[in-house]
Each structure stands twice: as structure tokens, then as C-alpha cells.
Image (cartoon, rainbow, N blue to C red):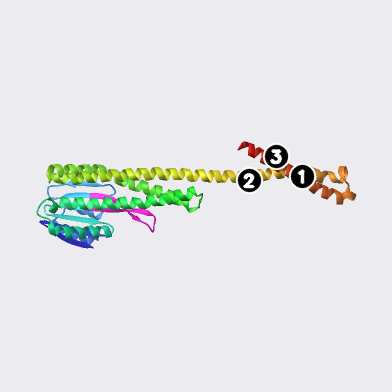
């Protein structure tokens, strides 16, 4: 979907989910270098910045969160800036990006021919919008981890919990390395603005550096929280397994003496103890003896367990 906006002397062409024909069209119209065309059509996993005599090119890899899938996907932002135009492309369509376009359309009516009509000011607004959206998407992960934490506190341990924790851990690794790659690019962008273009825009791009640092810090905090919940989950599972083993040991401790008595009695009753003529007395006596031994064993084990606690 392509939208066009004229802001003073600057023309903004915004294309979301572009196809090859869209890229070919703007490449021919603005005489873009084939390297830039390849970057617009290809996948730039790492963020990059390039500057030539005619064009300035910027590629930033962001992540888009899909709640229904519970994971992030790459959403690349590519920007080409010329003397009097700015071209922006994104892989996925975004309502927040449409809202930004509408906001700037309304604000542009009051813009004079100063720095706010510069393509680099529009670039700042675009990146700022992506950073704000990234912060919002991190809040989804934060809430999910909080829900898992509450379930662990209530000991509501379910099978899917470990899958969620692993998925969140992989998500954090993805977005962390994605934003870490932007640090050098944003620094280069600030230097580019400072030395070659309107220096009063530097304050805006320095603000982007602050937001990027905040995003990375939030990711680090969420990663540590995810690791902590993973350890807590493993601890709860270990305790649960220990309780099961303790119960089985408790049951075995009760039945071991009974097994011993039953084995001795069965081998001995014909010849040494009762003989077949006294079976009516022997069997009830055997069961009474087993009951007495079980009760004594049970009380000894309970007493030992209480003292241990």
C-alpha cells in the first residue's frame, strides 16, 4: 500500500508490504542505485546505513509481535532520502504507521519551511514511532511473564508453562540482538545529521539513542526475569518430584516388613508353626500381626519425619 504526502518542499512516499513492481517503480522514478534496490528487495538482517552523493539509505530491523502466535517476526524498515524526498518501506502493514502518516498530514498544514519540513525530521518521527511501538510490544511480554509468575506463586504449574517460558526466552534473544545491532547505526546517523545536515535535529536523534538504550535495558530485565521464572519452575518441579518419591518411600517402608513377614510365614506355616489343621487360626492371626506391624511402622516413620522438620 503506497501513500504520498507533500510537506513543504519534501515529498514523503510511504509503502507498506511492498511488491517488486512498487520498488521498480520508485527506483526508476528517483534513479536509485542498484545496491539500494537490492537492499529494498532483500532481507537486511543487520541494521545498516549508507551515504552517497545522491542518496542516503538506512535499514533498521525491528520486530513485530503477533499475539495469536505468541512470538515476534522481523519487520524491516528501509528509508531512502534524497534532496527533496524521503521513501520509507516496511514489510508488514501497520495501523500505528498509518496513524503516524495521518498525524503528520494534519500537522504539515502548520509547518513552515523550517526543519520540520526536512526529510530527516520525518525520518526521526518514523523511527520514534517504531521505538514507541517496540516498547508497547515489550509490555505484552512483561504481562505474560507476570501471569506465569502469579501461577507459580499459586503453585498452578501446568505443562504448557515450560513451553511459554522457552518461547519467551527465544523471543528475547531475537529482539535483543536485533536492537543491539542498531546502536552503531543510530550513532552514525547522529553524526551524519550533525556534520552534513540541520544540526538542530541532533537533539531529536539523541532522544532516539535514549529510547534505544531504554528498550535494550527493558529487554535485559525481561530476560533476567524469564531466567528467574525458569529456575523457579525447575525448583517447583524438583520439589514436586521429591514429594512423590517421599510418598513412594513412605509406602515402601510400610510394606517392606509386611513382605518379610508374609514370606517367612508362608514358608514356615506347614511345618514349623501351625500345620494345615490350624489354618483357621493362623490366617486371622497373620493379618492381625500385619496390622500391628503396619501401625507401629507408620508411627515410627511419622515420628521421625516430624523430628526432621
* Residue behind mark 2: 247
Q: Earlier in the sequence, mark 2 or mark 1?
A: 2
Q: Is residue 63 magenta?
A: yes
* Residue behind mark 1: 292
Q: Quadrant of the N terminus?
A: bottom left
Furthest toward the top, the residue is: 308
Q: Nearer the viewer, residue 40 or 100?
A: 100
The Cα–Cα distance between marks 3 and 2, rounded to whole angstroms, is 15 Å
Point 66% across, 38% down: residue? 304
Q: Is 119 positioned to the left or the right of 241 in the image?
A: left
* Tag 3 and tag 2, C-beta contact below 8 Å: no
Q: Residues within 10 Å of mark 2 (few under 14, many from 20)?
A: few
Point 70% across, 42% down: residue? 299
Count of labels in the image: 3
Judged by its main secondary structure, the magenta piece is: strand
Q: Secondary structure at mark 1?
A: helix
**Image location (x, y in percent) of residue 243:** 59, 45
Q: Earlier in the sequence, mark 3 or mark 2?
A: 2
Q: Nearer the viewer, residue 8 or 93?
A: 8
Q: Quadrant of residue 227?
A: top left
**Image location (x, y in percent) of residue 195:** 13, 42
* Residue behind mark 3: 300
Q: Secondary structure at mark 2?
A: helix
**Image location (x, y in percent) of residue 66:** 35, 57
Q: Earlier in the sequence, mark 3 or mark 1?
A: 1
Amino acid at each position: 500500500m503506497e501513500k504520498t504526502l507533500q510537506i513543504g518542499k519534501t515529498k514523503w512516499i510511504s509503502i507498506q508490504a511492498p511488491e517488486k513492481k512498487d520498488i521498480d517503480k520508485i527506483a526508476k522514478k528517483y534513479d536509485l542505485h542498484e545496491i539500494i534496490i537490492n537492499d529494498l528487495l532483500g532481507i537486511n538482517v543487520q541494521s545498516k546505513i549508507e551515504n552517497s552523493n545522491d542518496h542516503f539509505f538506512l535499514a533498521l530491523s525491528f520486530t513485530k509481535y503477533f499475539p495469536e502466535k505468541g512470538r515476534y517476526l522481523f519487520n524491516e524498515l528501509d528509508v531512502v532520502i534524497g534532496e527533496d524526498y524521503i521513501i520509507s518501506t516496511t514489510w508488514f502493514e501497520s495501523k500505528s504507521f498509518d496513524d503516524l502518516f495521518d498525524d503528520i498530514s494534519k500537522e504539515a498544514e502548520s509547518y513552515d519551511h523550517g526543519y520540520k519540513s526536512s526529510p530527516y525530521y520525518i525520518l526521526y518521527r518514523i523511527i520514534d514511532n517504531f521505538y514507541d511501538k517496540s516498547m508497547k510490544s515489550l509490555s505484552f511480554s512483561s504481562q505474560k511473564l507476570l501471569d506465569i509468575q502469579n501461577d507459580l506463586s499459586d503453585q498452578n504449574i501446568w505443562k504448557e508453562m515450560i513451553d511459554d517460558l522457552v518461547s519467551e526466552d527465544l523471543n528475547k534473544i531475537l529482539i535483543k540482538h536485533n536492537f543491539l545491532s542498531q546502536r552503531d547505526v543510530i550513532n552514525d546517523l547522529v553524526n551524519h545529521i550533525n556534520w552534513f545536515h540541520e544540526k538542530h535535529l541532533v537533539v531529536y536523534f539523541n532522544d532516539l539513542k535514549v529510547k534505544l538504550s531504554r528498550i535494550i535495558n527493558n529487554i535485559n530485565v525481561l530476560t533476567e526475569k524469564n531466567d528467574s521464572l525458569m529456575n523457579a519452575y525447575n525448583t517447583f518441579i524438583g520439589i514436586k518430584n521429591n514429594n512423590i518419591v517421599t510418598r513412594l518411600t513412605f509406602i515402601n517402608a510400610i510394606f517392606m516388613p509386611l513382605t518379610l513377614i508374609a514370606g517367612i510365614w508362608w514358608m514356615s506355616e506347614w511345618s514349623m508353626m501351625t500345620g494345615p489343621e490350624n489354618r483357621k487360626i493362623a490366617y486371622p492371626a497373620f493379618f492381625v500381626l500385619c496390622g500391628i506391624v503396619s501401625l507401629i511402622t507408620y508411627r515410627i516413620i511419622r515420628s521421625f519425619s516430624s523430628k526432621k522438620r
